[in-house]
């Protein structure tokens, strides 16, 4: 049973527009959430994180929103650039103990020039 | 030099072979991890080493045997694998396990992975 779900396997967006990647989780104990980006033939790289005490975290073109009541988070990329084309993984964990980081299956984003 | 280096990048082996995957990190981190990524599945944590001590074994079959001789090196010894073990094996490191768990600001740094194919 997947505790972190990324229900959209792929997304295509025009360059300059907003990309919105969604992630849902089922474990209410999760209190830290991360987004990783992965290019083909490379390992995932950390992008941005958010703790459950916040509902928004922004870093340049990337903003993550957290809706705890809905157990939903989203990553917004604006404006989208062709170099953003990659697979995006959502991940979550529960702090305060030896809890593993649980990853979603990923969403492949294609930004069309 | 990249932070986390994995060798080999690709490996094809028969079910009776013995091989090892190697991971090396140059970031001064104290925690290292092995993950498995199968097609259409999320990343699955296999093993965690914190300060050279194994802190987690996520119900991994004994045909996978990890070794962490020091904080910079991590090996995954493979023996008598099955076709379903074909996957991308990713190594990662972080400052330490507690930093990942407690701060959320110490993300894991991943290597580029070893693509393993079992014949």
Image (tube, coloured by chain):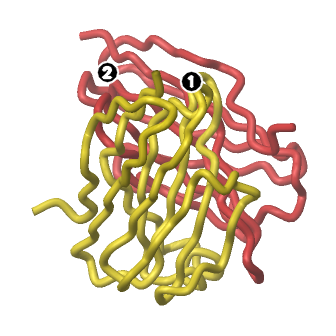
Chain colours: A red, B yellow
Which disc number belongs to residue A16?
2
> Residue B68 is drawn in which quadrant?
bottom left
Marks 2 and 1 close (CB-CB < 8 Å): no
Quick one: SS at disc 2?
Answer: loop
Quick one: SS at disc 1?
Answer: loop
Does B70 sit above or below residue B47? below
Picture residue at 25% right of the left edge, 22% below the top: A82
> Which of the two residues, A33 or B38, is positioned nearer the viewer here?
B38
Picture residue at 46% right of the left edge, 21% below the top: B119
Give the residue pinned by disc 1. Answer: B39
Label 2 – label 1 distance at C-alpha? 31 Å
State which chain disc 2 sits on. Answer: A
In this rendering, which labeled residue sits more in front, label 2 or label 1? 1
Does B85 sit above or below residue A53? above
Q: Is residue B82 left or right of residue B89?
A: right
> Which of the two residues, B16 or B65, is positioned nearer the viewer here?
B16
Picture residue at 27% right of the left edge, 67% below the top: B24
Q: Callout 1 environment at 10 Å: few (<14), some (14 to 19), or many (20+)?
A: few
> Which of the two residues, A76 or B35, is positioned nearer the viewer here?
B35
């Amino acid at each position: 049973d997947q505790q972190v779900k990324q229900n959209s396997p792929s997304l295509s967006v025009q360059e300059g527009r907003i990309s919105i990647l969604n992630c849902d989780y089922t474990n209410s104990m999760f209190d830290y959430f991360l987004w990783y980006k992965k290019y083909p033939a490379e390992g995932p790289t950390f992008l941005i994180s958010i703790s459950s005490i916040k509902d928004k975290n922004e870093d340049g073109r990337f903003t993550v929103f957290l809706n705890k009541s809905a157990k939903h988070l989203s990553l917004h990329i604006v404006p989208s650039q062709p170099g953003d084309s990659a697979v995006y993984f959502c991940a979550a964990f529960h702090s305060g103990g030896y809890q593993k980081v649980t990853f979603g299956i990923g969403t492949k984003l294609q930004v069309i020039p | 030099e990249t932070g986390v280096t994995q060798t080999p990048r690709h490996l094809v082996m028969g079910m009776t072979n013995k091989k090892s995957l190697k991971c090396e990190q140059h970031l001064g981190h104290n925690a290292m991890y092995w993950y498995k990524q199968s097609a259409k599945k999320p990343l699955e944590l296999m093993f965690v080493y914190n300060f050279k001590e194994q802190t987690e074994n996520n119900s991994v079959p004994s045909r996978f045997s990890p070794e962490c001789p020091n904080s910079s090196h991590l090996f995954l010894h493979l023996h008598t694998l099955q076709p379903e073990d074909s996957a991308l094996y990713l190594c990662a490191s972080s400052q330490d396990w507690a930093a990942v768990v407690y701060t959320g600001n110490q993300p894991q740094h991943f290597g580029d992975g070893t693509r393993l194919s079992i014949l």
